[in-house]
Amino acid sequence: MTNESKIEVTVLLPCLNEAETLEVCVRKALRSLAECGVVGEVLVSDNGSTDGSQEIAERAGARVVHAPIRGYGGALLNGIDQARGRFIIMADADDSYALADLGPFVEALRAGHDVVMGNRFRGGIAAGAMPPLHRYLGNPVLSWLGRRLFGLREVRDFHCGMRGFHAERIRALGLCMPGMEFASELVVRAALAGYDIAEVPTTLSPDGRSRPPHLRTWRDGWRHLRFLLVFAPRKTLVRPGGALAGLGLAGVAALTPGPFALGPVRLDVATLVYACLMVLVGVQLVLFGGLAEIYGRQEGLARQRTSDRWVRFLRLETSVTIGLLLLVAGVAGTGGAVAHWGLDGFGDLDPRETMRVVLPAATAIALGMVVLFSGLVGSLLTLRPTHRAPALVRQPGPGRDQVLNTR
C-alpha cells in the first residue's frame, strides 16, 4: 500500500498572497492531525501568489499545487481534485478558523456524514472576528433563505468557511463555481443530491493578516443570494408566479362582465388592466421556472420527476397547441370588439365597455406568444447530441475562405 493510499484526511487551504498567516495555519493543521491520530496532509491550492506563499507552505510541511482558475472556488475546486485524502477539511488560510481543533470534523466524517459544516455561532465568534453587518444581517438572512429554499434545517451557519466532506462524494457533484458562491454551491448541490449533512461547533478568530480580506461584502453577498435564488426555481419562480396568475385570473373573471364591488370599494376597468398584467407576469414566471427546471435537469441539478413534467409540458408540440388556442381566443375577442365598433360606425366608444373585451383578448394573444416561444426554448434545452460536433474555424485562403476542422 502506498503512502498516498493511506491518507485519510486532506486539510485544504486556498491561498492567494497569504504569507503572513499561511505558516501558522499549516503548522496548526498538521499538529491537530497528529493529535487526532489521523494520517493526513495539508494541501495548499495556490491561486498565483506573488509574496512567496508557496515556499512558506512547503517549508512548513504542506504540499502545494497551482490552481489555474482564479477565484476562491477555482482554488478549492483544484484542491479537491488534487487531494489524496478520503476526507477533505477546507478552511481559509487567514488564521481565523480553528485549524488546531479538527477533531469534531474528523469524528463526524468518520460517523458517515457526507458533508460536515462548521457553526461559528454555536462555537463562538471572538470580538472583531466578524463584521456586524455579516454577523447580524448577511449570514443569518442567507442561512435562513438556504434553509427555506432547500430544507437544510440542520444548517444554521450556511457560509462557514470551515467544513469537511467525503472527497469522492463531492467530486461526483460536478461543482463548477469559481468565485465566492462556491460555498453556497457545495451545500446546495449536496442537499439536492440527498447527501447527509451535519453541523459541528467551531470558533472564529480575528483575521491574522494586516491587509483587507479578499471578501467584498455587497458584491459577494449578492452573488451568494443570486445563486440561492437561481437554484430553487420552484420556490422563487413557479409558486409565486402561479399565485400571481391565479389572483389575476380571478380578477379578470370578476371584472370582465362589469364593475365589481368589494365592500365599500368599487373595482372597474383600471383594476382589470392590472389583473391582466398579473396574469401575464405570473404565467411568465411559471414558464421561466419550468425552463430553469429543465436546465437543472440537463445539468444534474433538479429532481428528475419534477423536471420530467416540465419537459412534457414545454415540448414544442404541446406549447404550440396551447399557444395557438390562446392566440385564436385572443383574435376572436379582438374580432368581436372590432365588429361591435363597426356597428357604431367606428365612432367613439365607451372605454369602460370596450376595454372589458379588448384587455382579456390582448392578454390572451400575448400569453399565446409567450407559451409558444417558451416551448421552443424548452425544446432547445432538451436537445442533446450523441457526440460533440467538430468546431469549424474559417481561415483566410487565396481568393476565398478555408474552413478548417479543428478536431
Image: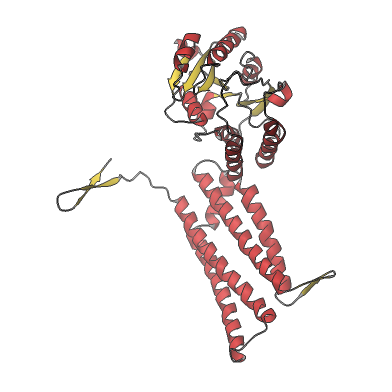
Where's the C terminus, which quadrant? Answer: top left
Q: How many marks?
A: 0
Nearest the camera: 259 or 298? 259
Percent x, y of residue 159? 63, 31
State the residue lying farthest toward the left. Answer: 398
Where's the N terminus, which quadrant? Answer: top left
Nearest the camera: 182 or 8? 182
Q: Is residue 17 above or below residue 340?
A: above
At horizontal 67% and vertical 21% (from top left) the residue drawn is 204
Percent x, y of residue 255? 72, 73
State the residue lying farthest toward the right. Answer: 264
Percent x, y of residue 281? 62, 60
Residue 313 location, quadrant: bottom right
At horizontal 77% and vertical 73% (from top left) the residue drawn is 260
Percent x, y of residue 134? 67, 32
Q: Is residue 393 above or below residue 65?
A: below
Residue 281 visible at all: yes
At horizontal 69% and vertical 57% (from top left) the residue drawn is 243
Q: In this rendering, would 377 be left or right of 36?
A: left
Q: In this rendering, would 295 be left or right of 200?
A: left
Q: In this rendering, would 235 be left or right of 88?
A: right
Residue 386 location, quadrant: top left
At horizontal 54% and vertical 10% (from top left) the residue drawn is 39
Q: In this rendering, would 121 be left or right of 346?
A: right
Figure coloring: secondary structure
Q: Is residue 25 above or below residue 235?
A: above
Residue 1 visible at all: no
